[in-house]
Image (cartoon, rainbow, N blue to C red):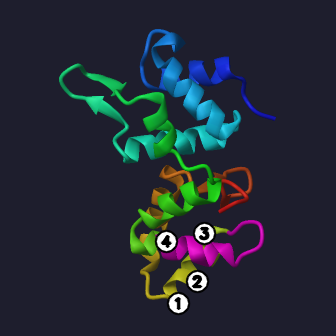
């Protein structure tokens, strides 16, 4: 199940503060083609474009802009979801990457206590673990399952 082209256009125009989806039509088409409407991948693709400065905040115009052609935008976004996720994880601080690696050995999800114990064994102070988890959450790598107070990967490809 994925979002349709119009839904992605609405999402992108809202996210980038545009008045109409027509202002992001080129961007919408490229992202839709690469993600097939999967909202997780839409967000990842947009973040990848921002990291590569294909989509940027113009401090003179006070707005989000992109000024590259469809072909250039298409080249900025990886065809492989795993490449996108690997690129994102590679850009994280070393201790956050360590957290991701340790979590990958835990089936399903983990609680804070377990994460603190495991990371402490790797030399990370327990007082720092919550900050590392916050960084991973803010980067869309893990989710906080608040109803059970546990942490899990945001996508099964991570």
Q: Which residue is mark 1?
A: 121
Q: Which residue is mark 4?
A: 97
The quadrant the N terminus occupies is: top right
SS class, disc 1: loop
CA gap, disc 1 to disc 3? Answer: 14 Å
Q: Residue at x 51, y 38 (%)?
A: 74
Q: Quadrant of residue 61?
A: top left
Mark 3–mark 4 CB contact (< 8 Å): no
Note whether 88 is above or below 38 in the view shown: below
The quadrant the C terminus occupies is: bottom right
SS class, disc 4: helix
CA gap, disc 4 to disc 1? Answer: 15 Å
Q: Is residue 149 magenta?
A: no
Q: Nearer the viewer, residue 116 or 20?
A: 20
Q: Which residue is mark 2?
A: 118
Instruction: Tell which circle, 4 or 1, labels the residue nearer the N-terminal end.
Output: 4
- Foreground label between 2 and 3: 2
Residue 49 at what x, y percent from top left? 44, 41
Residue 108 at what x, y percent from top left? 77, 66
CA gap, disc 2 to disc 1? Answer: 5 Å
Mark 2–mark 1 CB contact (< 8 Å): yes
Instruction: Tell which circle, 2 or 4, labels the residue nearer the N-terminal end.
Output: 4
Instruction: Tell which circle, 2 or 3, labels the residue nearer the N-terminal end.
Output: 3
- Foreground label between 2 and 4: 4
Mark 4–mark 1 CB contact (< 8 Å): no
Q: Which residue is mark 3?
A: 112
Q: Quadrant of residue 5?
A: top right
Q: Quadrant of residue 114?
A: bottom right
Instruction: Tell which circle, 1 or 3, labels the residue nearer the N-terminal end.
Output: 3
Q: Which residues are magenta?
A: 97-110
């Amino acid at each position: 199940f994925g979002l349709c082209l119009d839904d992605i256009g609405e999402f992108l125009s809202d996210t980038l503060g545009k008045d109409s989806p027509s202002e992001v039509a080129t961007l919408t088409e490229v992202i839709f083609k690469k993600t097939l409407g999967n909202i997780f991948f839409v967000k990842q693709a947009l973040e990848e474009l921002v990291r590569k400065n294909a989509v940027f905040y113009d401090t003179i115009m006070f707005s989000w802009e992109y000024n590259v052609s469809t072909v250039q935008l298409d080249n900025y976004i990886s065809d492989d979801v795993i490449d996108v996720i690997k690129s994102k994880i590679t850009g994280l601080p070393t201790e956050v990457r360590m957290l991701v690696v340790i979590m990958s050995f835990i089936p399903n999800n983990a609680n804070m206590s377990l994460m603190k114990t495991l990371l402490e064994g790797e030399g990370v102070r327990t007082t720092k673990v919550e900050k590392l988890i916050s960084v991973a959450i803010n980067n869309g790598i893990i989710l906080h399952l608040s109803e059970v107070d546990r942490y899990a990967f945001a996508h099964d490809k991570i």
